[in-house]
Image: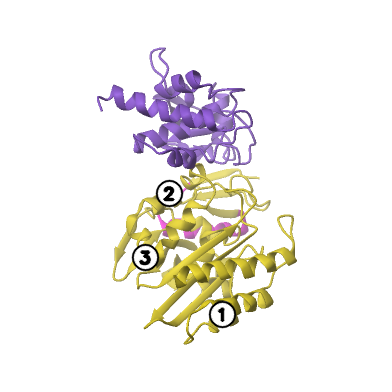
Chain colours: A yellow, B purple
């Protein structure tokens, strides 16, 4: 039961509150999820909207988006639409409706991790998460989740997206246009002289947290990027993806979707 | 806590867990509809600092120090806003439950995009579920409202 609401003026103050409250405290970005589904043990909401984390900047080969920037503000930031084949904007248009994108924050998405179209894309394009846990830190987003660092007390302060000419694609499959995905796939590919130099294929809403499919990604490296190779990667994706059933879809259906969406993403990147 | 709704300041007490939807209806703004109370249907949409959001999943304390605009604040001096008039003229209002939310979404769109395509109108209304109209008439209403507003602005 929420009994306290605190608007924090700074990241340091928010972190101090969070550590003193323990599981009773929860940080809030846009609040679209937390206000509907507050965990039972939480009694204090710490609103970050006053902590000056809303800016979006481009410098040093990276775009940095502050944690409380809304998804709409990201959509309106044109440089984000010009990198990685515009995949961030393509994906954001698939997220819920403008009514949610106007409130939902990028930091809230990254902190929660699940139930997200944002997270698989950020993983595929090598984004890093910025956070504060007594000192400002930066770490690749994949490491943030793989090491379960995201479960530690910390304040997500932003995300950094590299701007280096990679290509990317995103596909979401849902019952209706703004429903949560039954499954989603993102890929980020770098080419050198028409040959793949690095590849990340990420599957989200399995329905667990999004993961990179290592074997399917690696098969693309240093090989001629054609339909046969794409088909092979998609089949490996289907065979290696770890999925389960939930009310939105069965494990079998999710395996099928994985192959189809991986193929579509890779074909889009290859054209 | 202070909330400013349609240009009027309200001083009120609220529970930290209350949604903006519940508080607005308690203050008498019954045009803000509770459709699903789950962030799905858009009937509770209001503008916060010019941005349309669902008020059922918006914590009321987060709306302090913002300008809130509800459907009641669209018209002025007893005159309907052009968006409201166009919804009536086209039959974009049927049972009417989703209408306030649709008008709020349309208001935000037209404040940024004076001459929207049908695609842009549909994208703007995609968070507002309607079970009566099939969306054709509301889209037409927004298109007509946009034209009338451009005309009134001398463009």
- Checking the image for residue A228, the label placed there is 1
Q: Earlier in the sequence, mark 2 or mark 1?
A: 2
Instruction: Please tell me if label 3 and label 1 are on a single chain.
Output: yes
The image shows residue A244, relative to residue A93, as above or below, that is below
Which element type, helix, strand or loop, lies under badge 2?
Answer: helix
Q: Secondary structure at mark 1?
A: helix
- Check if residue A127 falls in the magenta segment: no
Residue A158's quadrant in the figure?
bottom left
| Mark 3 lies on residue | A83
Chain letter for the residue marked with disc 3 in the picture: A
Residue A246 place in picture, x, y as percent: 74, 59
Q: Nearer the viewer, residue A224 or B100?
A: A224
- Mark 3 nearby-residue class (10 Å; few <14, some 14–19, many ≥20): many
Marks 3 and 1: which is nearer the front?
Answer: 1
Instruction: Write the start and end of the magenta stretch as one range.
Output: A7-24
Can residue A126 be seen? Answer: no
Q: Which residue sits furthest left?
A: B154
Q: Quadrant of the N terminus of chain A?
A: top right
Out of A256 and A241, give the one closest to the viewer: A256
Looking at the image, is mark 3 or mark 1 earlier in the sequence?
Answer: 3
Percent x, y of residue B27: 54, 23
> Which of pointers 3 and 2 indicates the residue nearer the eye?
3
CB within 8 Å, label 3 to label 2? no
- Reading the image, the residue beneath label 2 is A72
Q: Earlier in the sequence, mark 3 or mark 2?
A: 2
Same chain under badges 2 and 1? The reply is yes
Q: SS at mark 3?
A: loop
Residue at 42% across, 17% down: B80
Q: Residue at x 47, y 35 (%)?
A: B105
Label 3 vs label 1: CA separation?
A: 27 Å
* Label pair 2/1, CB-CB below 8 angstroms: no
């Amino acid at each position: 039961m929420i009994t306290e609401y605190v608007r924090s003026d700074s990241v340091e103050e928010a972190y101090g509150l969070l550590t003193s409250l323990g599981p009773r405290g929860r940080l809030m970005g846009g609040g679209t999820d937390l206000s509907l589904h507050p965990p039972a043990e939480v009694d204090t909401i710490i609103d970050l909207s006053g902590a000056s984390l809303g800016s979006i900047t481009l410098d040093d080969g990276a775009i940095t988006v502050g944690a409380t920037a809304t998804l709409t503000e990201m959509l309106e930031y044109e440089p984000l639409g010009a990198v990685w084949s515009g995949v961030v904007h393509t994906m954001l248009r698939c997220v819920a409706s403008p009514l949610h994108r106007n409130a939902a924050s990028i930091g809230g998405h990254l902190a929660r991790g699940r139930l997200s179209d944002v997270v698989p894309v950020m993983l595929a394009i090598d984004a890093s998460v910025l956070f504060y846990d007594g000192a400002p830190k930066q770490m690749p987003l994949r490491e943030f989740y793989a090491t379960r660092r995201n479960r530690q007390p910390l304040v997500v302060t932003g995300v950094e997206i590299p701007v280096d000419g990679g290509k990317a694609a995103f596909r979401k499959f849902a019952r209706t246009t703004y429903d949560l995905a039954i499954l989603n796939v993102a890929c980020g590919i770098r080419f050198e002289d028409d040959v793949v130099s690095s590849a990340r294929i990420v599957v989200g809403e399995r329905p667990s947290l999004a993961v990179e499919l290592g074997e399917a990604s690696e098969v693309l490296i240093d090989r001629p990027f054609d339909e046969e190779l794409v088909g092979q990667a998609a089949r490996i994706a289907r065979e290696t993806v770890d999925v389960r059933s939930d009310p939105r879809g069965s494990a079998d259906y999710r395996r099928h979707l994985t192959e189809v969406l991986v193929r579509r993403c890779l074909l889009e990147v290859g054209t | 806590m202070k909330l400013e709704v349609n240009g009027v300041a309200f001083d009120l007490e609220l529970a930290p867990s209350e949604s903006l939807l519940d508080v607005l209806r308690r203050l008498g703004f019954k045009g803000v509809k509770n459709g699903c109370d789950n962030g799905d249907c858009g009937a509770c949409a209001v503008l916060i600092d010019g941005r349309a959001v669902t008020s059922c999943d918006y914590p009321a304390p987060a709306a302090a120090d913002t300008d809130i605009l509800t459907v009641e604040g669209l018209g002025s001096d007893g005159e309907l806003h052009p968006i409201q008039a166009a919804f009536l003229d086209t039959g974009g209002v049927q049972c009417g439950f989703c209408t306030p939310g649709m008008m709020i979404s349309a208001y935000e769109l037209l404040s940024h995009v004076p001459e929207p395509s049908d695609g842009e109108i549909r994208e703007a209304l995609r968070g507002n579920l309607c079970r009566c109209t099939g969306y054709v008439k509301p889209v037409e209403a927004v298109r007509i409202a946009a034209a009338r507003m451009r005309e009134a602005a001398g463009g």
